[in-house]
Image (tube, rainbow, N blue to C red):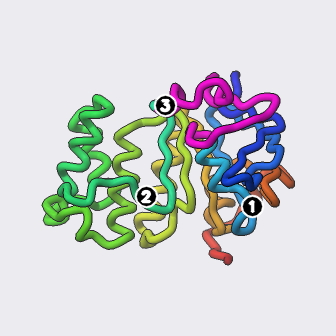
Amino acid sequence: MAAAVAFEGVVALLDRFPALAGVDLTVQAGEMVCLRGPNGAGKSTLLRACAGLVPLRGARAEVLGFDLIADRRSVRRHVGLLGHRAPLYGDLRVDDQLRHCAALHSAASAEVSAAVERFALGGRLTAVAIRRLSEGQQRRVALACLTIARPRLWLLDEPHAGLDESSRDALDEMLAYAVEAGATVMFATHETGRARVAAARQVVLAGGRVEAIAPAPRTDGPTDVA
């Protein structure tokens, strides 16, 4: 099976600073991988690099078969990136935002309804403008949009942040379902418990490099750490 992500000696300079300083990483298609490391380790940059949003150099930088050194744009329609800020239109109502996402990705109404139910976005909430939602509610809308988009590669930066426990559980179920359906998932987190429950492997970054790769240890439940 072809790798979803294949990086060899990948370097990314942000204002001349090496945010990625020679990353070697292979993620197989259909795998779920957790990125760990302190702030500034390069986790967010690595996710953005996989989404084709960061200029790269190196021996090899391929995502879903696309050469990101030669062409960063072509991969973008195949990946879904959720960063710290939800990519939403503040003036749209929740239901309009979801319909807009469905139209962009040719999703059926049943898929929208399933996303609404999964992230508890029904009832009076559907008519509320995005800008009037709490941070957690906006993140739920963004996750629903990601579900509707059905990307081949899911890239999530601290995906559980701002969510209540039921929404966190819904997110974990959604990611597991995505992997079962053949998608690949990479997410960065500081929450040890969530990483252990969800991911098959954890990749530890430090100083813009991959410091260690190991099977994710298992636990009976989520345990948050700083």
Q: Measured from the top left, where is residue 222 in percent x and y?
A: 61, 70
Amino acid carrying label 1: it is Ala
The residue at the point 71 percent across, 64 percent down is 40
The residue at the point 70 percent across, 28 percent down is 3
Amino acid carrying label 2: it is Ala
Q: Quadrant of residue 24?
A: top right
Residue interval drawn in magenta: 50-76
Q: CA distance from mark 2 to mark 1?
A: 28 Å
Sequence-wise first label, 2 or 3: 3
Q: Is residue 166 above or below residue 106?
A: below
Q: How would you rate the neighbour count of disc 2 (Cα within 10 Å): few for under 14, some for 14-19, many for 20 or more?
A: some
Figure quadrant of the C terminus: bottom right
Label 1 sits on a secondary structure element that is loop
Sequence-wise first label, 3 or 1: 1
The verdict on residue 62 being magenta is yes
Q: Which mark is residue 41?
A: 1
The residue at the point 63 percent across, 57 percent down is 188
Residue 202 appears in the picture as rendered: no
Mark whose residue sits in front, 3 or 1: 1
Residue behind mark 3? 78
Q: Quadrant of residue 136?
A: bottom left
Residue 89 appears in the picture as rendered: yes
Residue behind mark 2? 170
Sequence-wise first label, 2 or 1: 1
Q: CA distance from mark 2 to mark 3?
A: 23 Å
Q: Measured from the top left, where is residue 131 in percent x and y?
A: 26, 66
